[in-house]
Amino acid sequence: MALTSALIEVLKRELKSRDITYADVAKQLDLSEASVKRMFSTKDFMLSRLDEICEYAGIEFADLARAVEARDSLLLQLTLEQEKELAGDPKLMLVAVAAIHHLSYEQIFEAYTLTQAELVKLLTHLDKLKIIELQPNNRIRPLVARAFSWLPAGPIQTFFYAQAQADFFRSPFEGAGEALLFSSGRLSKASAKQLAERLKRTVQEFRDAHHEDLKLPIGERPVTSVLLALRQWELPAFRELRRKGK
């Protein structure tokens, strides 16, 4: 069952990269779109159905199996050298982030002021860095795992934090789906550790929602960011009034 589940997840990704929708698959199989969605949701596939979908999408089953095998080698983080290279070139970093977010070549070109020659050159560079695999017809396959994260305090986090301080908080956070929450109190180390683990699970829920929403049109998926932080900290104005050693 675990292998079947992995095959279906890879198949979904491959269909997405080819802009093949559940409606397209349903039409090919002479089924309702709801039936196809249920098949992918429950991962209840007959082998013949799997073969039909692969043949329709132009996917070799052997390639699907190899993709499952390669899944465990996907990157959880980049190296320091890779991050430095991205951080040193804003256009390269832009395309890398877009690719990691599963945008297609066409979607990146439509959204940003890059020429086709520039975009191909940047994608080729990312392929050489082994951050993506640039496939025929400029199809992009990210080589990062679902739980991918930037290096803590690394070049990319440092860049984004600088941007966040300058721009992210310049908002009343009153829009639909927006929130700015702040609370201060006194916690034991054990309580702080438990809370930190919950925040990590919240980030994972955010990543899961991102991947689940990949099936929606890009116009329904605006770029959304979440920033969570927890540390021992007191307002500097209060800290200055503390007695020494207290």
Image (cartoon, rainbow, N blue to C red):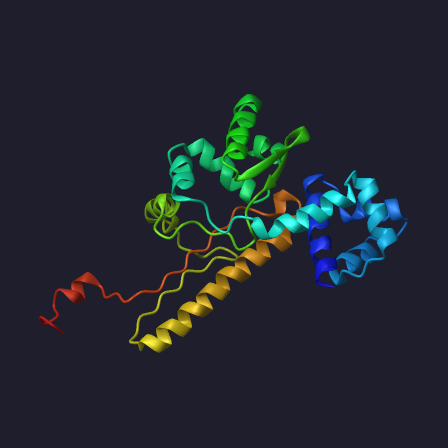
**Looking at the figure, which quarter contains the N terminus?**
bottom right
Q: Is the residue 213 above or below the residue 242 in the image? A: above
Residue at 45% x, 37% y is 93
Q: Is residue 124 above or below residue 151?
A: above
Q: Is residue 103 visible?
A: no
Residue 114, x across and y down, in percent: 52, 26
Q: Outermost residue toward the left?
A: 244
Q: Locate residue 232 relative to residue 156 in the image: left or right.
A: left
Name the residue nearer the viewer: 40 or 114.
40
Q: Is residue 174 left or right of residue 33?
A: left
Farthest residue toward the right?
30
Q: Quadrant of the C terminus?
A: bottom left
Q: Residue at x 32, y 75 (%)?
A: 189
- In the image, 184 versus 207, the foreground residue is 207
Which x, y percent locates residue 159? Answer: 36, 43
Please tell me in which quadrant of the rendered image residue 46 appears. Answer: bottom right
In this figure, what is the number of numbered marks? 0
Residue 207: in sight, yes or no? yes
Is 22 displayed left or right of 178 in the figure? right
Foreground pick, 72 / 94: 72
Q: Position of residue 121 (x, y in %)?
A: 53, 25
The picture places residue 6, in percent across and down from the top left corner, at: 69, 56
Residue ID at (64%, 55%): 212
